[in-house]
């Protein structure tokens, strides 16, 4: 049974995986036997990531690359193929959020979020699919969001990008499923990472941030997720255990999407 979830002999590229969700997914992949390759946007982040992997006993390969730069992504994939091997698993994890009310957001700010969170996964997927086709298999996992399904104040660009990423996932599955490529999404709930730190900051009087209390009340599990909560679902979607799962978004949200919310 456990062989089904093995990633022995697989090369996995996880984007933006120096820390946070990408790092936790990479750690779970390494524990399942995969060779870890990651990129991040700055050398200092890559160095920080390499030091963390080393401290965790993982021999990872780290590269600087901006996921929005198509030429650089193509060059990175060619370099990985030469130095490590053909990529069997791609996790499109790199992403940003800008919390700005829509009418105050500039078009340039909106475009930047769409560029990293939606165009980035398009560019990276496009770069790895041809070799996956040649190799006869491939797994692509797109890190979606609650905002692939729900809206809220201040996150118009992020919701537009993550809603788009859900549909890109279904389209990659539709277009390349016949080549034994499975493309699925993971929709994390509210996860305690630097990206969400401003929503959890303690108030001057030491009490919880109102958004922090709101999320705990909105989550049947009554807690924020940890990045490690995403490891098991990611290994499932990267492994042979999910070979007939395609175009699916697996929400790992402690039940948020199932719940109407606590009555006042
Ligand atoms: P994070 O802590 O901000 O990590 C994201 C990583 O991506 C950072 O290292 C970031 O670098 C990097 N990155 C940003 N732009 C990039 C680019 N153009 N090219 C390459 N790398 C780039 O975020 P996280 O919370 O771990 O989230 C990871 C993914 O999960 C994101 O797609 C996010 O939207 C999604 N997600 C997060 C949550 C949550 O609750 N935390 C929930 C649902 C979905 P910098 O540090 O320089 O920005
Ligand atoms: C926000 C949050 C969310 C989460 C996540 C939810 O401001 O509402 O940052 O967007 O990061 O994507 O799944």
Image (spheres, helix red, strand yellow):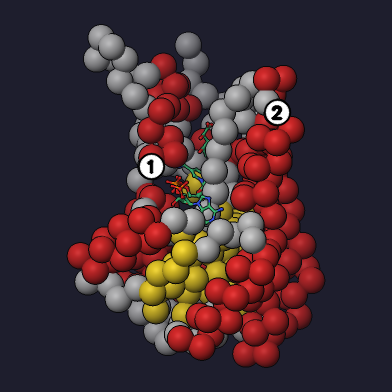
Q: Residue at x 70, y 82 (%)?
A: 130
Q: Is mark 1 within 8 Å of ligand 1?
A: yes
Q: Quadrant of residue 140?
A: bottom right
Total count of labels: 2
Res. 102 in view: yes
> Helix, strand, or loop for circle 2?
loop
Residue 2 visible within the image? no
Which residue, given by chain and number where applicable, does mark 1 sit on? 193
Which dot marks residue 147? none
Q: Quadrant of residue 30?
A: bottom left
Q: Which residue is mark 2?
A: 106
Between residues 152 and 261, which one lies in front from this camera angle? 152
104 vs 222: above or below: above
Disc 2 residue: CB within 8 Å of ligand 1: no
> Going 60% across and 75% down the picture, which residue do you hit?
75
Question: Relative to 221, is 3 above or below?
Answer: below
Left or right position of 47 against 133: left
x%, y% of residue 224?
38, 36
Q: Return the residue nearer the eye: 46 or 183.
A: 46
- Residue 155 pos. (x, y %): 62, 30
Residue 54: percent from left, percent from top: 24, 69
Up/down of 187 relative to 181, above or below: above
Nearer the observer, disc 1 or disc 2?
Answer: 2
Residue 44 in percent (x, y) is at: 36, 56
């Amino acid at each position: 049974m456990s062989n089904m979830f093995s990633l022995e002999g697989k090369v996995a590229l996880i984007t933006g995986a120096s820390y946070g969700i990408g790092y936790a997914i990479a750690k779970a992949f390494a524990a399942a036997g995969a060779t870890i390759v990651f990129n991040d946007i700055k050398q200092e982040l890559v160095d920080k990531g390499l030091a963390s992997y080393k401290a965790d006993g993982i021999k990872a390969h780290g590269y600087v690359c901006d996921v929005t730069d198509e030429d650089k992504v193509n060059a990175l994939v060619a370099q990985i193929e030469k130095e490590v091997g053909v990529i069997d698993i791609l996790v499109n994890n790199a992403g940003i959020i800008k919390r700005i009310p829509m009418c105050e957001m500039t078009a340039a700010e909106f475009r930047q979020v769409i560029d990293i969170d939606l165009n980035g996964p398009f560019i990276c997927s496009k770069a790895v699919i041809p070799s996956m086709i040649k190799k006869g298999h491939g797994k692509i996992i797109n890190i979606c969001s609650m905002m692939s399904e729900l809206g809220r104040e201040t996150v118009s660009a992020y919701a537009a990008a993550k809603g788009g990423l859900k549909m890109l996932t279904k389209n990659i599955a539709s277009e390349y499923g016949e080549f034994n490529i499975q493309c699925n999404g993971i929709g994390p709930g509210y996860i305690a990472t630097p990206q969400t730190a401003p929503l959890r900051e303690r108030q001057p009087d030491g009490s919880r941030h109102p958004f922090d209390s709101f999320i705990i009340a909105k989550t049947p599990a009554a807690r924020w997720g940890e990045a490690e909560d995403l490891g098991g679902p990611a290994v499932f979607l990267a492994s042979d255990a999910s070979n007939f799962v395609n175009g699916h978004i697996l929400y790992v949200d402690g039940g948020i999407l199932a719940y109407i919310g606590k009555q006042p």
